[in-house]
Amino acid sequence: MSLRHAVLAALSHGEASGYELAKRFDVSVADFWSATPQQLYRDLEKLERDGLVEARVVEQQRRPNKRVFTLTEDGRAALRDFVEAPARPAAIRDEFLVKLQAVDAAADPGALAATAEARLRRSRDKLARYEQLRDRLLAGRAEDDFLRHGDPVGPYLTLLAGILYEEQNIRWTTLVLRRLAERREA
Amino acid sequence: MSLRHAVLAALSHGEASGYELAKRFDVSVADFWSATPQQLYRDLEKLERDGLVEARVVEQQRRPNKRVFTLTEDGRAALRDFVEAPARPAAIRDEFLVKLQAVDAAADPGALAATAEARLRRSRDKLARYEQLRDRLLAGRAEDDFLRHGDPVGPYLTLLAGILYEEQNIRWTTLVLRRLAERREA
DNA sequence: CCCCTATACTCAACAAGTTGAATAGGTGCG
DNA sequence: CGCACCTATTCAACTTGTTGAGTATAGGGG
């Protein structure tokens, strides 16, 4: 049970409705803990029953009302406990790597190359988004400046992980494409 | 349903019993598709019912008998279809990143630093294992040599992904440790 | 001789994640 | 004026993945 904790972590950066959380997950957390809206709504309910979050209805005129969730004191304590407990090792589930692992059994490596190209485009898009986010976070300050007395270090460091990951991914995928092309010629 | 495909991919590199598959997963596939032995046994049964793999009992004297699984023609065809179909984007589930995201809410960043150090050790271990595996695969040949007429490119390229991933991970985690230490001093 | 580890697998219960659809008002575009 | 898309959420069914225990045989070390 760990999406719970991802939700608590997300809410620690400010209250949100289920819908808003879904978007927040999409831009910032998706790359290390993805979740569908349905999952979020379900877990928010559970968290509410357990007293870790509180909901309050916000009436809106031009759109449907929403339920905005805040961490309770118990929620904050649970989050602290979670942060300080040892983490289980990361689990990666990357279908592309499975396909590549078996590429020698395929008739046509061209199809996989197309998949690799899609992946490359995706990585570039993500990287661009991440760098935009970083610029916004830094707001002109140098990294050192920001990290030493800027407020939250967490979001910056995880963002950096995303940036480095995508950069490395781009290099690797490019290399794979070259090798697959060589193979196709031979 | 995709552990199925990871199993087919693994079996395409040679027949194996459930137990042997579990070990193969542990050394080579775990980093992009992890599975417990229980999961493997369950899926192997399903694959057998669906006619994608065949089992044959191998009697052994000094240890329990085992059921060795091989791909059937249908299994090979299913694998080919899978490899050529587009891949869904990778899902990462990294608890450490969730904790780091919320580190500013914790009382003691020292606990997270300990977790980061454990992660660093793990990455270094993995990297060492991967490089050993690479040396064994290359067997003295240069990469170019191997990839151009060496037999299977798949396992080499995925191994390379693992190596690059861990190298990058080590750099990033080191950086995180430095920043957390700075934070603790302040 | 006993315990630990390795091989080889099975069973059961549960937790977590995925998929698809339904509802319902509002905004923007041609 | 109709159609598509955005906000905001709920329901239900399903597939995957996790945890923990249990069975049985054999070899090695103290």
Image (cartoon, coloured by chain):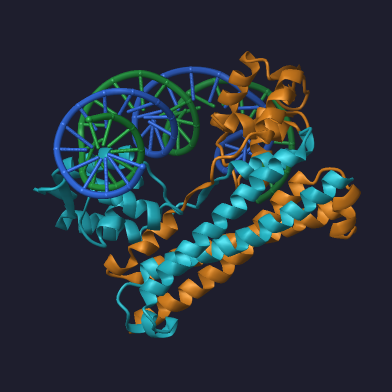
Chain colours: A orange, B cyan, C green, D blue
Q: Residue at x 69, y 61 (%)?
A: A128
Specify whether C1 is left or right of A62.
left
Location of residue A18 in the rendering, given as x and y in whole percent from the top left corner: 65, 28
Taking depth in this image into account, of A88 and A178 the one nearest to the observer is A88
Q: Is residue B182 above or below residue B156?
A: above
Q: Residue at x 39, y 64 (%)?
A: A100
Location of residue A103 in the rendering, given as x and y in whole percent from the top left corner: 34, 66
Is residue B76 visible in the rendered image? The answer is yes
The quarter of the displayed image where residue A105 is located: bottom left
Specify whether A27 is left or right of B128.
right
The quarter of the displayed image where residue A107 is located: bottom left
Is residue B86 visible in the rendered image? The answer is no
Q: Residue at x 56, y 56 (%)?
A: B123
Taking depth in this image into account, of A2 and A24 the one nearest to the observer is A2
Q: Residue at x 37, y 41 (%)?
A: B36
Name the quadrant of the C terminus of chain A. bottom left
